[in-house]
Image (cartoon, rainbow, N blue to C red):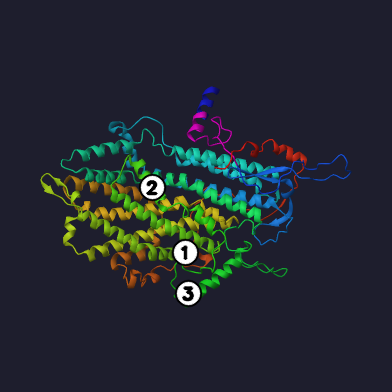
């Protein structure tokens, strides 16, 4: 009986990639790397007393700071300090290292980053699971008949819970008024264990389950295309892609998201760790808020007066400066401003260089991100190659979203974190920078397919050249139709983007933990989400106006594909308030067009439809985004306890630096 229980637990642990530390299946393997020295090391032990000295003295002892799997050497003399606040400007003296509170802040930011990574993965998996109801169950029932069946079940969104809870458990002991070396060292190791378990799980998501019913269905659909006579190979590839994307859109979404997460998460972690080390070595303050501009410290209020604002240290002063700058912009230019143009400071924030590094802007070219997304499509659809024009569309949409999100993230550093992120402002920013490009992309590819003679198909003696029916229609009319549809799609995309960013901001502000790492952990997810929400409408419009116009067997394929994709999207969008929130502006866009003036960016009429620039106390609460938010009522003050010999010896045996590997 006990053997059976043990075997069951082993199987559960294996399914989670060794998710729960201490589970019978065992945690995933951890690897540690030698990090930069953050303090001079010493060979003596705390409380050392020379035989020739009467007075005891502390010559210091080698300690280490574990951060993101790197072991950073330090000395015990740098650790302890009296109570300090990590959200105010501090003037550290040359000899006052005060590393205790700096280590705590870095670990808390690491936990926030990890929690955002994990919450994002769970959200994408949950989106996929929503599409498996109804039609998915019917597909599963017939899986054996069409080539599926057998094997192990796919990982579930709920499986991620173990990793998120491990992060919360790891960081909770350091959120204390008294910071101890034992707790700091253990938290660094436990966070890295949670990371290793999660990354092992992420690898599992790249291997589709053997009994995937959609996989078997895809084989049947592909065979049905092959049975239609006279189809050129190039056209057959396109129709296989059309069907695959229609019946497995969320599988494709998960496919390219997981690859983005695998590639980008380590890059983001590297930048965050390097910035944390720099801040420790140079003794930056405010200790917890590294990324934001460093304003002057607010004046101390008279005794008995309650301070105005959020109470989050220096951020109240930052908000005051932001409001003044925004007022200047609105008074001198126009009342209608967008998220990316309001209140830009004179110089970049201190974390700007590390932001570019973490988002792979420099030195990695955007084409690497494009290749990752293309590979996600191929992996999910079981295709070894895709038609060139499809890869070009993917590349263009990826580039647009990458550039736009980079600007958004830079603005998130420039503006005070207590300032709400408004949907109207974000939509205006996207509309000014992306709408015309997306419309041009659709029109170019419609024209390309209309002109591509090799894509003309002769089926049962009848020529069905894609888009032939549109050759008689006016291009201006088609352009207006595309413009209207892409405008609505962009509104919905920005609504979902702000749901995520503002939801995370509200969570972090509530817990006094509004660090850039909360946003950075969401970047792979938001890049995948924005791509999904812009690529699918672009693809629909291209197909609607080319292959969607053909009749006969191929026309039936396109129609069935469109119905399947619409059903999947409806499942994912269930419960969202986007339609209600955007009803007026959507109705106007659909019925009147954009009333495009010079440059196509006239906002006439839309401002009155959508006045969501609300004051902070009136902004509605957003849904929970970081499901495993790791900190509750984060303390902004703390003293670090002096490392005594007994405590040192207790930790020393678990030091990782001596056996850690060298940096690559």
Measuring 54% from the left and 47% from the top, which residue is drawn there? 114
Residue 432 or 638: which is nearer the viewer? 432
Q: Nearer the viewer, residue 519 or 648?
A: 648
Q: Measure how far apart labels 3 and 2 are at the Cα level.
A: 41 Å
Nearer to us in this view, 164 or 448: 448
Q: Residue at x 35, y 36 (%)?
A: 212
Q: Which is more foreground, mark 1 or mark 2?
A: 2
Q: Nearer the viewer, mark 1 or mark 3?
A: 3
Mark 1 element type: loop
Image location (x, y in percent) of residue 454 = 19, 49
The earlier-in-sequence mark between 1 and 2 is 2
The residue under label 2 is 371
Whether 312 is drawn above or below 645: the answer is below
Query: Is 18 contained in the magenta span?
Result: yes
Marks 1 and 2 sit apart, C-alpha to C-alpha, by: 32 Å
Disc 3 target residue: 330
């Amino acid at each position: 009986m006990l053997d059976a229980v043990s075997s069951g637990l082993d199987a559960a642990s294996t399914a989670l990639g060794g998710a729960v530390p201490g589970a019978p299946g065992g945690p995933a393997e951890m690897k540690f790397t030698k990090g930069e020295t953050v303090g001079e090391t010493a060979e003596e032990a705390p409380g050392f007393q020379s035989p020739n000295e009467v007075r005891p003295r502390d010559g210091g002892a080698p300690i280490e700071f574990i951060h993101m799997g790197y072991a950073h050497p330090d000395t015990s003399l740098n650790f302890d300090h009296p109570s300090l606040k990590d959200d105010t400007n501090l003037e550290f003296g040359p000899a006052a290292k005060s590393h205790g509170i700096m280590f705590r802040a870095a670990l808390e930011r690491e936990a926030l980053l990890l929690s955002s990574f994990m919450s994002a993965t769970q959200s994408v998996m949950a989106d996929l699971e929503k599409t498996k109801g109804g039609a998915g169950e019917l597909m599963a029932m017939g899986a054996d008949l069409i080539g599926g069946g057998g094997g192990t079940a796919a990982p579930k969104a709920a499986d991620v819970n173990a990793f998120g809870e491990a992060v919360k458990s790891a960081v909770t002991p350091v959120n204390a008024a008294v910071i101890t070396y034992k707790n700091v060292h253990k938290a660094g190791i436990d966070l890295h264990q949670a990371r290793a378990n999660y990354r092992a799980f992420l690898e599992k998501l790249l291997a589709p389950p053997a009994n995937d019913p959609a996989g078997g269905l895809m084989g049947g659909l592909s065979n049905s295309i092959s049975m239609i006579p006279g189809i050129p190979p190039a056209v057959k590839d396109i129709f296989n892609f059309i069907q695959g994307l229609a019946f497995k859109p969320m599988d494709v979404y998960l496919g390219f998201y997981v690859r983005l997460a695998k590639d980008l998460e380590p890059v983001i972690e590297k930048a965050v760790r390097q910035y944390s080390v720099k801040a420790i070595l140079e003794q930056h303050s405010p200790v917890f808020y590294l990324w934001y501009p460093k304003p002057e410290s607010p004046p101390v209020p008279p005794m008995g007066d309650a301070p105005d604002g959020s109470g989050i240290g220096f951020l109240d002063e930052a908000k005051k400066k932001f409001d003044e700058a925004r007022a200047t912009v609105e008074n001198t230019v126009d009342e209608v401003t967008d998220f990316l143009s309001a209140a830009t400071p004179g110089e970049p924030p201190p974390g700007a260089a590390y932001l570019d590094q973490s988002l792979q802007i420099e030195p990695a070219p955007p084409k690497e991100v494009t290749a990752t997304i293309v590979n996600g499509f191929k992996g999910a659809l079981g295709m070894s190659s895709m038609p060139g024009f499809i890869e070009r569309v993917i590349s263009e949409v990826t580039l647009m979203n990458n550039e736009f999100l980079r600007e958004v993230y830079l603005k998130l550093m420039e503006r005070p974190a207590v300032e709400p992120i408004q949907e109207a402002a974000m939509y205006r920013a996207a509309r000014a920078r992306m709408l015309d490009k997306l419309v041009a992309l659709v029109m170019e590819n419609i024209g390309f397919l209309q002109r591509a003679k090799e894509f003309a198909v002769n089926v049962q003696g009848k020529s069905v050249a894609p888009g032939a029916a549109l050759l008689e229609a006016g291009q201006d009319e088609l352009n207006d139709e595309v413009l209207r549809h892409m405008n609505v799609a962009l509104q919905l995309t920005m609504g979902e983007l702000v749901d995520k960013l503002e939801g995370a901001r509200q969570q972090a502000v509530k817990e006094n933990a509004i660090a850039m790492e909360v946003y950075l952990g969401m970047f792979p997810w938001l890049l995948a989400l924005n791509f999904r929400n812009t690529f699918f409408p672009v693809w629909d419009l291209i197909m609607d106006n080319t292959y969607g116009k053909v009749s006969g067997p191929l026309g039936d394929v396109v129609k069935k594909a469109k119905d399947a994709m619409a059903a999947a999207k409806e499942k994912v969008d269930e419960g969202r308030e986007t339609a209600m929130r955007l009803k007026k502006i959507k109705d106007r866009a659909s019925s009147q067009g954009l009333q495009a003036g010079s440059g196509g960016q006239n906002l006439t009429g839309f401002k009155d439809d959508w006045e969501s620039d609300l004051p902070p106390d009136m902004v509605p609460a957003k849904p929970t985004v970081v499901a495993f938010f790791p900190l509750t009522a984060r303390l902004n003050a703390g003293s670090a306890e002096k490392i005594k010999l007994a405590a040192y010896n207790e930790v020393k045996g678990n030091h990782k630096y001596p056996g850690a590997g060298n940096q690559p």
